Amino acid sequence: MRRLHTLDLVPDLSGQEVVRRDWQALRDAGLPSQLDHPGRTNAPHVTVVSAPDLPDDVVDLARVRLGSVLPVRARAAGLLLLGGERLTVARAVDIDDDVVRRVLAVRVHVTDRQHAGWLPHVTLARRLDRASAQRAVDVLGHDDVELVLTTLRRWDPDRDHVTTVAEAR
């Protein structure tokens, strides 16, 4: 199976710490956590788009449309449980409507994108069994946190390479 290329919005160091605390809380509870992801590029992020390939013109468009509004203030609010037999646990991320429109303007140019719609979120855990869902919710709590998204990055799994596309000034 071919791995997916992504464009991601990455929070500042303070926001990354907030998300990593969630990752650690899950691990401390003996639950799956993104801390278990061994990749050297594993970092808290909000995926803008993922696809088998991201042409350079899409990356350039994202640089113009999204790079120009960085930093983006967002609120990580509420928990999402996504999936079937195994769940992905994520924090829903509330983002300004202007930024949402800009993301959709980029996504529409990626015809083979992974998902038809955009659900901004930060993944906390993957492959959680359904029987552990309530425990994960209890561990993570209900506090909303502010994230400041400061970087737009591109992940190229074919080259095993992360590139910074744009950063807040």
Image: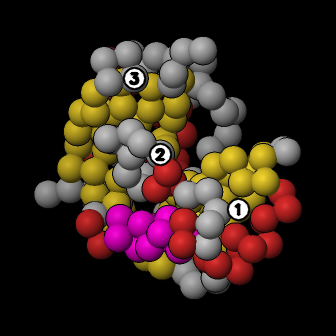
- Say which element carries label 2: loop
Confirm whether the magenta stretch covers residue 42: no
Residue tagged 2: 37
Amino acid type shown at disc 1: Leu
Please name the amino acid that badge 2 sits on. His
Marks 2,3: beta carbons within 8 A: no
Depth check: 144 or 166 in front? 144
CA–CA distance in space, label 1 to label 3: 26 Å
Q: Earlier in the sequence, mark 1 or mark 3?
A: 1
Mark drawn on residue 157: 3
Question: In this orientation, does residue 82 appear?
Answer: no
Specify few, some or many for label 3: CA neighbours under 10 Å numbering under 14, 14-19, or 20 or more. some
Q: What's the mark number on residue 80?
A: 1
Quadrant in which the C terminus is drawn: bottom left
- Kindly give the residue lying farthest to the left in the view shown: 169
Horizontal placement of 55 versus 46: left or right?
left
Query: Closer to the camera: disc 1 or disc 2?
Result: 2
The segment highlighted magenta reads 16-26
Up/down of 50 relative to 30, above or below: above
Q: Measured from the top left, where is residue 12 in percent x and y?
A: 28, 64
> Is residue 19 within the magenta segment?
yes
Return the x and y of residue 89 as percentages of the image width and height.
Answer: 66, 58
